[in-house]
Image (cartoon, coloured by chain):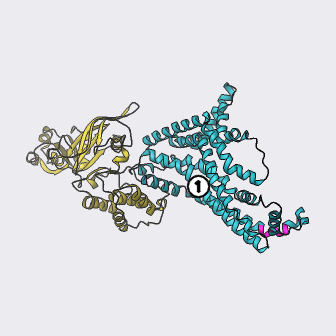
């Protein structure tokens, strides 16, 4: 992310560059002239409430919807060059989009015929670790198995950009853990960028390198994960130090286990340690603090 | 081109019930009925007047016919085979219509369009494949099944005739049969090109209807016809549609004024002259070309709808 990430080397290849990206449905502005760019070799979490504009943004990137403004994805204009773009971009836009009338093996046959970057052996390897029967129709598979097939296909395509919109919805926790692990270990490398949206933020935060918060069609925060988690500190304020704590202007405060808790942004940890026990905030808490408090 | 081939194969797989199972089942039914009736032929003929001429069975009938009308026999038998294999053709218009109607609708309804769009295939390729398979591939599959059925029928009947001591080679007018098969392709193509604006309309409905594509496809033209009849008291829309769905043949063939005498003339006309008339009339008909232009507009609109659909 360009604005906040100071670590990125100059001239880094940009996977996505958007300037003044807008999309309206009648009077409703799903995207409000947003600017952003994403470099190669990142795992970006796009986080926002339902209806915040996440899916609209992803759809624009994937060439699934029209938009106003300037958008380049891997050098292509997604609105007019979706077919060329899809040679290097992969996505799961929603669960259960695999054609139900096809057998699993037929899905693989089809992808093998149309996608030059698909490695069937790799897909078979992924599937061999599951209980998915190849000769069954997608219709006959459980929700979890359907997603496993889709993920096996996507992970076996040599794409430069992978977009996952709620990829593990409806899957059990063991599979979700395994999926993110193999995404990180077997798929992700410095020549690829992955964009993930999910409601289960806790499960992805350890693999994200960057985050983007979206609210009401605006990007309210773009940050490097490491920088971000260092910025937000929560303090369990010791009794008697409440006034002192409030004086430091926490972005949010509440009470838990009978103690006051305050969340601070960009305040020196040593200073805060004098007030009480400190801890880093999880991404979900940072999101809530940013959206509801004065953190933005 | 490989992408298009993959899309065509996918469409055939998707519609294999209509494209393959339906003609196979109907051809099988035809052959079973024929077998049953040829087994019963010897008895049935007892009640027929022809009994007087000493005809006991199919073998006798063929022998007699060959003796009296040898010149007409190959054409008559070829036409006979076409008559016997008429059943699958009844289903073809329904298969084409419903395949087109579902082609761009079902993928939106079951959301699989999001999967298709995640692949490097262009929307125009998708739409053209979804037109090409019902309009061109399906009829060719039907024709293949009918050819196989005709050959099987010829085999079965020649065995029957052989056992009954008749002229079994007469049952194999192969050259005539091949001519009709090729002739059918050209004839169908003329019908399909005339009907292209209707096909393209159904495809466009399939691309834009959110619900009830059948009503859109059928009711919209029906309402147009009704409105025209009520307010203008004319029937141009209806006439136009009728002309494109086969009415054009009246003008193409109506004026030949040729005397037809026997099966051979019918066959000669169907495999040669009729096509000449069909194409010379069509290619010089303004109606025909307007239809093609309208079809092009509908197809363009369907592609634009497919681009925007998610």
Query: Farthest residue toward the front?
Result: B71
The one nearer the camera, A99 or B50, is B50
Q: Residue at x 37, y 68 (%)?
A: A128
In the image, which residues are magenta?
Answer: B38-44
Q: Which residue is mark 1?
A: B140
The one nearer the camera, A231 or B113, is B113
Above or below residue A242? Residue B91 is below
What shade does chain B have?
cyan
Q: How many marks?
A: 1
Question: Is residue A145 shown left or right of residue B199?
Answer: left
The one nearer the camera, B41 or B81, is B81
Q: Dot 1, how many residues are within 10 Å of its Cα: few (below 14), some (14-19), or many (20+)?
A: some
Which chain did the renderer colour yellow? A
Question: Image quarter for residue B153?
Answer: bottom right
Question: Is residue A162 shown left or right of residue B134?
Answer: left
Task: Look at the image and tell me whether residue B108 can be seen.
Answer: no
- Per the image, label 1 sits on a secondary structure element best described as helix
Task: Look at the image and tell me whether residue B156 can be seen.
Answer: yes
Query: Farthest residue toward the top?
Result: B232
B40 falls in the magenta region: yes
A28 falls in the magenta region: no
Q: What main secondary structure does the magenta stretch of the protein show?
A: helix
The one nearer the camera, A277 or B285, is B285
Question: Image quarter for residue A213?
Answer: top left
Q: Residue A229, image x and y in percent? A: 18, 48
Q: Residue B13, image x and y in percent? A: 51, 58
Q: Which quarter of the image is occupied by the N terminus of chain A?
A: top left
Above or below residue A62? Residue B161 is below
Q: Residue A48, image x and y in percent? A: 31, 43
Q: Chain of mark 1?
A: B
Q: Residue A89, image x and y in percent? A: 32, 50
Question: Image quarter for residue B216?
Answer: top right
């Amino acid at each position: 992310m360009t604005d906040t990430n100071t670590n990125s080397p100059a001239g880094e290849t940009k996977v996505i560059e958007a300037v003044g990206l807008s999309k309206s449905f009648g009077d409703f502005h799903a995207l409000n002239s947003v600017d952003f760019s994403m470099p190669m070799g990142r795992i970006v979490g796009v986080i926002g409430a339902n209806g915040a504009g996440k899916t609209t943004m992803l759809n624009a990137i994937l060439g699934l919807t029209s938009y106003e403004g300037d958008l380049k994805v891997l050098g292509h204009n997604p609105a007019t060059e979706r077919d060329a773009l899809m040679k290097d971009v992969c996505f799961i836009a929603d669960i259960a989009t695999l054609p139900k009338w096809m057998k699993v093996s037929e899905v693989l046959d089809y992808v093998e015929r149309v996608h030059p970057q698909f490695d069937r052996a790799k897909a078979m390897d992924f599937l061999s670790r599951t209980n998915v029967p190849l000769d069954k129709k997608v219709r006959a598979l459980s929700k979890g198995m359907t997603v496993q097939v889709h993920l096996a296909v996507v992970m076996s395509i040599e794409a430069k950009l992978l977009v996952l919109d709620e990829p593990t919805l409806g899957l059990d926790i063991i599979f979700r853990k395994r999926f993110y692990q193999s995404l990180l270990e077997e798929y992700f490398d410095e020549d690829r960028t992955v964009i993930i949206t999910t409601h289960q933020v806790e499960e992805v935060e350890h693999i994200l390198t960057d985050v983007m918060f979206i609210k009401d069609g605006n990007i309210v925060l773009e940050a490097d994960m490491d920088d971000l988690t260092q910025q937000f500190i929560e303090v369990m304020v010791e009794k008697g130090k409440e006034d002192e704590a409030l004086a430091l202007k926490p972005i949010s405060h509440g009470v838990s286990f009978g103690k006051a808790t305050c969340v601070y942004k960009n305040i020196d940890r040593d200073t805060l340690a004098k007030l009480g026990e400190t801890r880093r905030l999880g991404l979900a808490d940072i999101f809530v603090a940013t959206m509801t408090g004065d953190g933005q | 081109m490989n992408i298009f081939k993959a899309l065509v194969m996918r469409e055939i797989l998707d519609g294999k019930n209509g494209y393959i199972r339906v003609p196979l089942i109907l051809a099988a039914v035809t052959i079973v009925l024929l077998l049953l009736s040829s087994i019963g032929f010897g008895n049935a003929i007892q009640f027929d007047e022809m009994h007087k001429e000493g005809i006991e069975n199919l073998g006798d009938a063929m022998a007699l016919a060959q003796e009296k009308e040898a010149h007409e026999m190959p054409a008559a038998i070829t036409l006979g085979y076409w008559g016997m294999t008429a059943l699958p053709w009844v289903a073809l218009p329904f298969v084409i219509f419903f395949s087109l109607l579902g082609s761009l609708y079902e993928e939106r309804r079951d959301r699989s369009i999001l999967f298709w769009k995640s692949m490097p295939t262009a929307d125009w390729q998708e739409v053209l494949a979804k037109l090409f398979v019902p309009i061109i591939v399906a009829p060719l599959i039907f024709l293949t099944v009918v050819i196989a059925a005709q050959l099987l029928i010829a085999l079965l009947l020649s065995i029957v005739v052989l056992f009954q001591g008749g002229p079994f080679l007469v049952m194999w007018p192969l050259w005539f049969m091949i001519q009709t098969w090729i002739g059918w392709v050209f004839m169908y193509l003329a019908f399909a090109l005339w009907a292209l604006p209707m096909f393209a309309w159904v495809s466009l409905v399939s691309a834009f209807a959110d619900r009830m594509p059948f009503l859109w496809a059928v009711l919209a033209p029906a309402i147009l016809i009704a409105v025209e009849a009520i307010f203008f008291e004319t029937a141009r829309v209806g006439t136009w549609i009728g002309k494109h769905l086969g009415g054009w043949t009246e003008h193409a063939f109506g004026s030949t004024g040729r005397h037809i005498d026997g099966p051979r003339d019918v066959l000669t006309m169907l495999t040669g002259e009729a096509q000449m008339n069909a194409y010379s009339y069509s290619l010089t008909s303004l109606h025909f070309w307007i239809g093609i232009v309208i079809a092009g507009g509908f197809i363009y609109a369907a592609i634009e709808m497919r681009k925007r659909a998610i």
